[in-house]
Image (tube, rainbow, N blue to C red):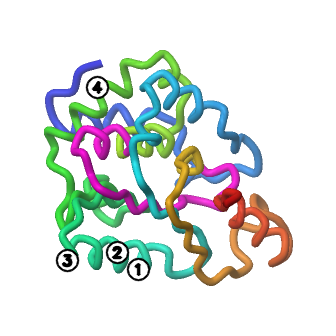
Amino acid sequence: MSFATFADLCAALDRRVDLEREPQSGGYTLDRMRALVDELGHPERALRAVHVAGSKGKGSTCAAVASALHASGWRVGLLTSPHLVSARERIRLGPRPAPDRLWLEAAERVFACAAAADATWFELTTAIAFELFRAAEVDLAVVEVGLGGRLDATNVVSPTACVITRISLEHTAILGPDLATIAREKAGILEPG
């Protein structure tokens, strides 16, 4: 699939299931995302990443980490969600939104995958970010979890470091009825070692 403009890409994304707009108590799995990054040649494996989960302060934490690393001379990619005005806000290179050209090039590679056919809005956008970061040769990607952690599409990344911000009772129909259960879901981003 080819995209002439960023608006064309957004229209294609908007035809997909969007669990941010219409959360469901089921359907969360890493199977689609794993198939997608596998078909892309695992762009997430080319990244050193800081993976951030939690209930409150994820976006602020991601922005602070990315800003500090950028100020130290690192080439930094930043993936956050949700966006306020435009999907462009979600993927940044350094302090600026990634250029449309890089979005479109990465999106064309992602949408060309057979696995993209069943992927959700968030899974596609996450794969686009990983592909864009690989192409831009970032030194480090700061990746904000969308929902939970264990089954979030971002959890295909193998992080250099993980951060878990404050946890509270949120999304209980999806993540569980109490803080301990929600904490286990958030801790799903942690890897041994």
First in sequence: mark 4 vs mark 3: 3
Q: Which residues are magenta?
A: 130-152
Residues at marks 4 and 2 touching, judged by CB atoms closer than 8 Å: no
Q: Looking at the image, which residue is at 56% across and 35% down? A: 33
Q: Earlier in the sequence, mark 4 or mark 2?
A: 2
- Tell me residue 27's x, y (percent): 71, 40
Using the image, determine if residue 27 lies above or below residue 94. Answer: above
Residue 71, disc: 3
What kind of residue is marked 2?
Ala
Relative side of 68 to 165, left or right: left
Query: Is 154 one of the magenta-colored residues?
Result: no
Q: Which residue is mark 1?
A: 60
Of callouts 4 and 1, the N-terminal one: 1
Q: Compared to 139, does 33 lie above or below? A: above
Badge 1 element: helix
- Residue that badge 4 annotates: 108
Q: CA distance from mark 4 to mark 2?
A: 27 Å
